[in-house]
Amino acid sequence: MKLQEGTDTARLFGSHDRHLKAIEQEMGIRISARGEMVMLKGPRTAVNGAGRLITDLSELVNQGLRIDTEDVHSAIQHVRDVPEGSVRSLFSDGLRISTAKRTVHPKSVAQRTYLQAIGKSDIVVGIGPAGTGKTYLAMGAAISALNKKLVQRIILTRPAVEAGERLGFLPGDLNAKIDPYLRPLYDALFDLVELEQATRLIEIGNIEIAPLAFMRGRTLNDSFIILDEAQNTTSEQMKMLLTRLGFNSKLVVTGDVTQIDLPRDRDSGLEEIREILADIEGIEFVHFSEQDVVRHRLVKDIIKAYDRHGRNTQKTRGARHEKPHAS
């Protein structure tokens, strides 16, 4: 296959051809490239998919998009999930979010669905494993909304301590006690916004980062609210936050129902709302899987391994509890 004349092959192929190597490994083919000529060898279906992938990525590069290895892996997964779909739509469907520090765009079908839901619904619930971009994409959407003056403030919150926000046993003052539990929200914020700008926005109150208990008794108008680690909210806490929503506000709830750390006698508020709020118009649920993980490729394999282990453990326990038949 021949690429469009003038294609920046250095950006398309990656440093030391790492993008091509990723396609080879993931799609089970051989690739050789010389200038704008690319030769593909392997099973016909895989070659066709890889050819379409490279063509789409080259067009995106020619349009000025900078792609990294993570983008390539996302594009490969998209080709697998949507054989007839266009990789271009994954990166250029109008859902790119630009902040002062970086550009955020969906890297899987579920991520695209998630951002579309955030754009049109007042309450969005993203459920799935770690590393699928639930909090990061919501943070990008919140910063974009603040920059466009669609909201006056961003409120970032999460349960301060998994089992009911019991902070008394921790050393230090209140800030020292709650800071470790809010640190992941700061990490996402600082990855998208320069430190000085983020600090200024926090100081003047345009961005508030606080434990969930601090939301009680408030009405949150003109706000973009993100509740992170929602699987560790109790039923009462979840209801409390949902009923804080004010006018011209948006709430994004994120969590992983396989990582619940509440005591066994407490129900997860996240699990509960999947049934209670499922049919309410204006509330949208988006589910992610290990296929949407955009961290190191080993994270996806680790999640799959834990899922297999969990299923096998349940089967083993079930077999142990089966009563023997009477002779």
Image: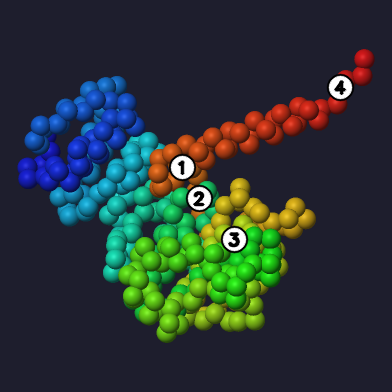
The quarter holding residue 212 reads bottom right
Mark toward the start of the polypeptide (1 vs 4): 1
**Residue 120 located left or right of residue 171:** left
Counting residues from the start of the chain, the first of labels 2 and 3 encountered is: 2
Q: Quadrant of residue 159?
A: bottom right
Q: Which residue is mark 3?
A: 230
Is there CB contact under 8 Å for labels 2 and 4? Answer: no
The residue located at (14%, 31%) in the rendering is 33
**Separation of residues labelled 1 and 4 (CA atoms):** 41 Å
Question: Which residue sits furthest bottom?
Answer: 204
Q: Position of residue 67 (x, y in %)?
A: 25, 49
Disc 1 marks which residue? 299
Give SS at disc 3: helix
Which label sits on residue 324? 4
Residue 46 appears at what percent x and percent y? 30, 28
Around disc 4, counting alpha carbons within 10 Å, would you say few (fewer than 14), some (14 to 19), or many (20 or more)?
A: few
Residue 247 placement, left or right of 15? right
**Residue 12 marker:** none
Residue type, numbered disc 2: Ala
Q: Secondary structure at mark 1?
A: helix
Q: Is residue 139 visible?
A: no
Say which of 198 and 254 sits in front: 198
Q: Which residue is mark 2?
A: 130
